Amino acid sequence: MIRNNITEVAYNVQTTVDSKNNLPIDYKVTNENDSKAMGNMVQRAKSILRTTDFTVLYDKGFHTGSELKTAQDLGIETIVAVPSTPSTSQAPNHDYNYEHFIYNKEADTYTCPQGQVLRTNGSWYKQLSSSGSISWFKQYKTKACRKCPARSQCTKSKKERLIQRSEYADYYERNRKNTLEKEKLYKRRQAIVEHPYGTLKRQWGFSYILTKKGMNRASSDVGLMFIAYNLKRIGNILTRDRLKEYLRILVSLFLTPKCHSRLKSSLLGTFNFWLTVLTSKFHGSLVMP
């Protein structure tokens, strides 16, 4: 971002957090917005968990057709908040908004609230989004609009009402159904994924990163924050002494006779550092209860 000839570096942190213990299992630092982030993070979660038997919860900033397709094609259930219809796309009477038109998949037609059938000529049209991505859609209309008594309630167009169906419509509709049927599950999203951010930024004061020269350094900075967060969370769940024992076991797995002396030294140094974290103050807040 450039403002008054001053360059401001801003990064976006994507995280995957488990719903049981609010533990981040993955993160990624990018310089892109949320609209194209979900698909890759879901693929990474699948690789980490080695299963597709989980549900992903995202806010409306991630509601993008191609990303929904990526997740759902993997067999993963999506519950992504559906953005409200822009005022410019709404009908004069909201009872005639797009969602009240019924789609017939076999016939590839729409039926309007007045019972008229809208058909397509079968052509696909290209659409360019503000982010530069390309998608395709078909158009549906009927000449019955011209003499329809409800026309003024349905459209402001001088011609007939035009319905556009995206190539990702099936994915949008499957996600919309999930959000309606599992609204209570979606409401847990903030308590799950915002929990680590609230702790890091509000309680620990990590409202910015220390290393700003390059995304890799910024990613390392964020990684250390999440390691510290997870260690404290795990310590709270397992107790401090049990976590210490797990760390000792983990280090011992690497300290084999074939292990290089430098690696041994590095592992022991890391182990000692985290023991210090667990038994003393770190940034004024990492004290185990």
Image: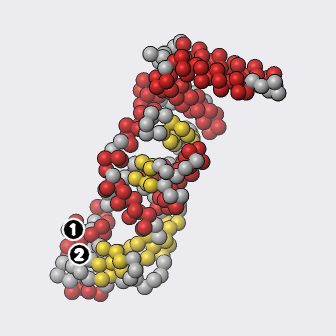
Q: Is 160 on the left-hand or right-hand side of 55?
A: left
Crowding near the residue tagged with mark 2, few <14, some 14–19, many ≥20 C-alpha atoms within 10 Å: some
Image location of residue 140, percent across then percent down = 37, 79
Q: Which residue position is annotated with label 1? A: 95
Pick whichever, 256 or 90, lies toward us. Answer: 256
Residue shown at 47% from the left, 81% from the top: 123
Residue type pointed to by label 2:
Pro
Q: Which SS class for mark 2?
A: loop
| Rendered position, 35 above or below 217 | below
Q: Which SS class for mark 1?
A: helix
Pick whichever, 216 or 254, lies toward us. Answer: 254
Q: How many marks?
A: 2
Please report contact status of discs 2 and 1: CB closer than 8 Å, yes or no.
yes
Q: Which residue position is annotated with label 2? A: 113
Mark linked to residue 126: none
Q: CA distance from mark 2 to mark 1?
A: 8 Å
Going by the picture, which residue comes out furthest to the left? 149
Image location of residue 223, percent across then percent down = 58, 32
Image location of residue 125, percent across then percent down = 48, 76
Residue shown at 45% from the left, 55% from the top: 77
Pick whichever, 203 or 184, lies toward us. Answer: 184
Residue type pointed to by label 1:
Asp
Q: Please say whether residue 36 is visible from this viewpoint.
A: no
Pick the quarter of the image with the C terminus. top left
Crowding near the residue tagged with mark 1, few <14, some 14–19, many ≥20 C-alpha atoms within 10 Å: some
Residue shown at 39% from the left, 77% from the top: 105
| Rendered position, 17 above or below 175 | above
